[in-house]
Image (tube, rainbow, N blue to C red):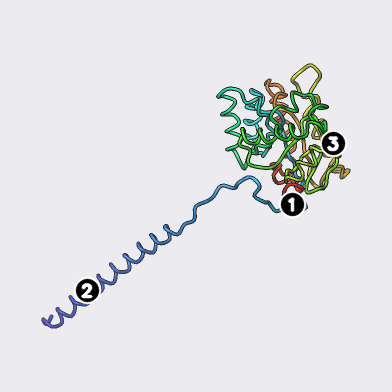
Amino acid sequence: MHLSKKIAHIGMSLLTLTLLASCNGNSSADKKGTDSTKTAITKPVPGTPIKYDSSKRYIYLTWDDSPQPPGTVNSKAIFQAESVKATFFSVGFNQVGPFKKRLIDSIRNGYPMFLLANHSFSHGFNDKYAKFYSPAMTDSALSDFLRNERELQIGVKIIRLPGNNTWASKGEIHGQKANSPLIKKLDSLGYKIIGWDLEWGQQKKMKAPQESAVEMVKRINQKFDDGNTNQQNAIVILSHDRLFEKKQYADSLSKFIFLLKQDKRNVFETIDHYPTVQQK
């Protein structure tokens, strides 16, 4: 090969290598650029709206009086194992000692699976409901809810009244205490008050569910079939943490959820996604 041709050949080879190196460099840069523009996945905060599906039936499991270990611990573990959402309406004076504080922290930090909501600090001045709801005690009862919100660091303005099935949202109030000055005051301050459509009750003198899992599911289906709930396609179930502290009753809760999950229309949600709470 002539010298001039050899030089030309070497020149072409060098040019090819340069172009390849350049391309490889650009690929790395592009890849790096792509990685650097990835957006972080943010955790939803309580109250983040959802879109309802009219073909679904929304079930709101709301457990009152936490922290009440081991019932609260058992209930949380079952909800987690079954991947269902639930709301804990908590009471401030039950949070005694570091273990119960950690339990409340785990509920608060467990969103979107768990929601921490307000059930008053004193549980209605230690179950003295006549006094708690009397007009003369309106300011004291209001302060009781505000104290609970502050001390438990509750991030939503959602309340269940102790010993009382009343609903309130944006001036629409109905239930046992519809004319109570306390309820009207809470409503005027933007609090949403949640009652219940169906209670999984407690046996007298025993920390045990009154109805079987099968009976509760039957009653839920009947409520939906009859359209007999506070909001269409939505049902609020009330129960208490303490009912599920023994293994046989915790197993009943597992069975209850298992049976409900057999109907693909059923969707479990936290109470911040209840229609009267979510509405603007």
First of labels 2, 1 by sequence position: 2
Amino acid type at circle 3 is Lys
Q: Is residue 214 visible to the viewer in this orientation of the structure?
A: no
Residue 23 in the image: state x and y as whole percent: 32, 68
Residue 177's disc number: 3
Q: Residues within 10 Å of mark 2 (few under 14, many from 20)?
A: few
Give the vertical position of 204 relative to 195 (above or below): above
Please give left or right for residue 249 compared with residue 110 in the image: right
Element assignment for label 1: loop
Kind of residue sitting beneath label 2 = Ser
Which of marks 1 and 3 precedes in the sequence? 3
Q: CA distance from mark 3 to mark 1?
A: 22 Å
Residue 158: image x %, image y %? 71, 41
Mark in the foreground, 2 or 1: 1
| Residue placed most toward the observer, 277 or 220 | 277
Tell me the residue at 72%/24% (across/down): 243
Disc 2 and disc 3 in contact, CB within 8 angstroms:
no
Q: Residue furthest top?
A: 205
Number of other residues with Cα within 10 Å of mark 1, as a class: few under 14, some 14 to 19, many 20 or more = few
Residue wearing tag 2: 13
Q: Residue furthest right?
A: 226
Q: Earlier in the sequence, mark 2 or mark 3?
A: 2
Mark 2 against mark 3, which lies toward the viewer? 3
At 83% across and 39% down in the image, what residue appears?
221
Q: Which residue is mark 1?
A: 279
Q: Tag 3: Cα neighbours inside 10 Å, few (<14), some, or many (≥20)?
A: some
